Image: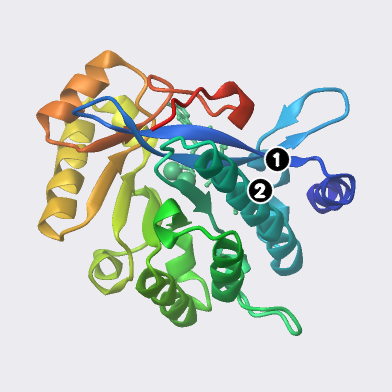
């Protein structure tokens, strides 16, 4: 497949990098952390998003190699921000279901994450792990649950990404190990024009709170959406209104 070859080449030539998008506390407008989003920077200066190499993130071997690189970049960035004395909050890392598959001769994902943060002298509270509904439906579902629980026990926040767009049932919401629900941007962007979407966003916020989970609205693009979310008591948001994904050098953070 072309996507796999593209990813192989990007790994070999060091073309993968991360962009960062702020997660905002909606009452204060201050960032509480940043989501790391993978980008492939080509020689001609163009930048590709994961959609262009999605198959590589579903491949057991390639996804682990890319994931290791992502982890290294994110930990190095967190270390750089911490050393500069800026309060970045946390970096949230996206992990695909194939990254949880055990590979012979290679440490498990949980150990990789623990080792990377520990050896940088950083606390787990500086990182979050984002997984989609897909990981719960994958064949290794039960084992992935145990791995996520191990990460939570170690102090990492686990976020349930793109909530509401997959095929997971509500059973997963009570049985799955997670701390945070991220409401998919498609509902948020429609909520000010559609009473159905508004009702769904409200229901997810209320349900998350009743379950004792953090809740983040994704894809916030307008002030109208921000006001609607505040009115519903949504504590956190993310989206172009607050900041587009950008390279760390383009993000200005003030010292503590
Ligand atoms: O960045 P957008 O910018 O296009 O991201 C598209 C999708 O790619 C998102 O669903 C996101 O979860 C996923 N994604 C972004 N960065 C990473 C990454 O580092 N690893 C994995 N596995 N998925 C990622
Ligand atoms: O991990 P996840 O699937 O949530 O990835 C977030 C995706 O959403 C990334 O592709 C990111 O670039 C994109 N994104 C972030 N904020 C906005 C926004 O406000 N509007 C739109 N349309 N996309 C966004
Ligand atoms: Mn995400
Ligand atoms: Na999402």
Residue 212 in the image, given as x and y percentages of width and height: 16, 59
**Front residue (pair 20, 46):** 20
**Res. 193 in view:** no
**Front residue (pair 182, 81):** 81
Label 1 environment density (alpha carbons within 10 Å; few <14, some 14–19, many ≥20): some
User: Is 86 displayed left or right of 78 in the figure?
Assistant: left
Residue 34 in the image, given as x and y percentages of width and height: 46, 39
Check the image and report above or below for 173 versus 240: below
Instruction: Identify residue for label 1.
Output: 17
**Front residue (pair 101, 88):** 88
Q: How is the image coloured?
A: rainbow
Q: Which quarter of the picture shows residue 112?
A: bottom right
**Res. 255 in view:** yes
Quadrant (top left/top right/bottom left/bottom right) for the C terminus:
top left
Marks 2,1: beta carbons within 8 A: yes
**Front residue (pair 91, 209):** 91
Check the image and report above or below for 84 versus 116: above
Check the image and report above or below for 10 versus 171: above
Residue that extends furthest to the top in the rendered view of this protein? 223
Confirm if mark 1 falls within 8 A of ligand 1: no
Numbered circle sitting on residue 73: 2
What is the CA distance from the residue labelled 2 to the residue labelled 1?
A: 7 Å
Q: Could you say whether the residue bearing mark 2 is in a helix, strand or loop?
A: helix
Q: What residue is at 59 percent from the left and 22 percent from the top?
A: 250
First reached walking from the N terminus: tag 2 or tag 1 = 1
Q: What residue is at 67 percent from the left and 49 percent from the top?
A: 54
């Amino acid at each position: 497949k072309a996507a796999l070859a593209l990813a192989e080449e990007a790994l070999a030539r060091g073309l993968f990098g991360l962009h960062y998008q702020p997660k905002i506390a909606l009452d204060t407008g201050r960032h509480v952390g940043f989501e790391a989003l993978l980008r492939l920077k080509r020689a001609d200066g163009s930048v590709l998003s994961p959609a262009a190499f999605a198959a590589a993130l579903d491949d057991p071997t390639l996804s682990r190699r890319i994931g290791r690189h992502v982890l290294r970049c994110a930990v190095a960035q967190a270390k750089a921000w911490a050393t500069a004395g800026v309060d970045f909050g946390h970096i949230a890392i996206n992990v695909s279901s194939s990254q949880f598959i055990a590979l012979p001769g290679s440490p498990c994902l949980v150990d990789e994450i623990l080792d990377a943060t520990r050896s940088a002298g950083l606390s787990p509270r500086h990182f979050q792990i984002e997984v989609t509904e897909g990981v719960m439906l994958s064949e290794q579902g039960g084992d992935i649950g145990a791995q996520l629980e191990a990460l939570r026990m170690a102090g990492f926040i686990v976020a349930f990404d793109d909530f509401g767009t997959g095929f997971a049932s509500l059973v997963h919401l009570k049985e799955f190990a997670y701390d945070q629900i991220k409401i998919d941007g498609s509902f948020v962007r429609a909520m000010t024009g559609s009473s159905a979407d508004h009702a769904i966003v409200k229901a997810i916020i209320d349900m998350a709170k009743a379950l004792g989970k953090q809740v983040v609205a994704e894809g916030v693009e307008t002030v109208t959406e921000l006001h609607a979310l505040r009115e519903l008591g949504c504590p956190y948001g993310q989206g172009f209104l607050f900041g587009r994904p950008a390279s760390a050098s383009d993000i200005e953070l003030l010292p503590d």
